[in-house]
Amino acid sequence: MAWLHIVAPKGAVPTANSQCECGRNRSAVGKPRVLALIEDHTAHRDQCLLRTPQEGRTAA
């Protein structure tokens, strides 16, 4: 599982936390960094070894 928690109250600085069951834990403060974390979180979800099925993959 992967979690993305964003807090962006009107008129305040937004914050975000990204966590994954693989142990990855990232946080960001400020709009540009929060937007970057959202993209990073999405990319990690697609690449995480705990979330990506390993069956049928070839060895490197």
Image (cartoon, rainbow, N blue to C red):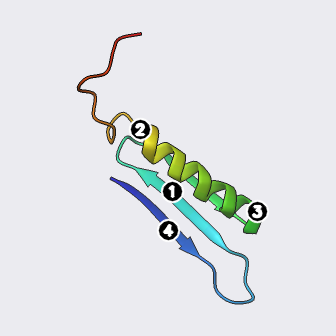
Give 14 or 39, whichever is nearer the viewer.
Answer: 39
Circles 4 and 1: CB distance less than 8 Å? Answer: yes
Of marks 4 and 1, which one's residue comes earlier in the chain? Answer: 4
Q: Position of residue 10 (x, y in %)?
A: 69, 89
Mark 2, secondary structure of its residue: loop
Residue 18 image label:
1
Residue drawn at point x = 42 percent, y = 60 percent: 3
Residue 48 image label:
2
Q: Residue furthest left?
A: 55
What amino acid type should be assigned to the residue bearing mark 4?
A: His
Position of 34 compared to 1: left or right? right
Q: Using the image, determine if residue 5 lies above or below residue 41.
A: below
Residue 32 image label:
3
Neighbours of disc 4 within 10 Å: few (<14), some (14-19), many (20+): few
Circles 3 and 1: CB distance less than 8 Å? Answer: no
Residue drawn at point x = 49 percent, y = 68 percent: 5
Mark 3, secondary structure of its residue: helix
Of marks 3 and 2, which one's residue comes earlier in the chain? Answer: 3
What amino acid type should be assigned to the residue bearing mark 3?
A: Pro
The answer to whether any part of residue 24 appears in the image is no
Which residue is the site of mark 4? 5
Residue drawn at point x = 49 percent, y = 44 percent: 44
Of marks 2 and 1, which one's residue comes earlier in the chain? Answer: 1
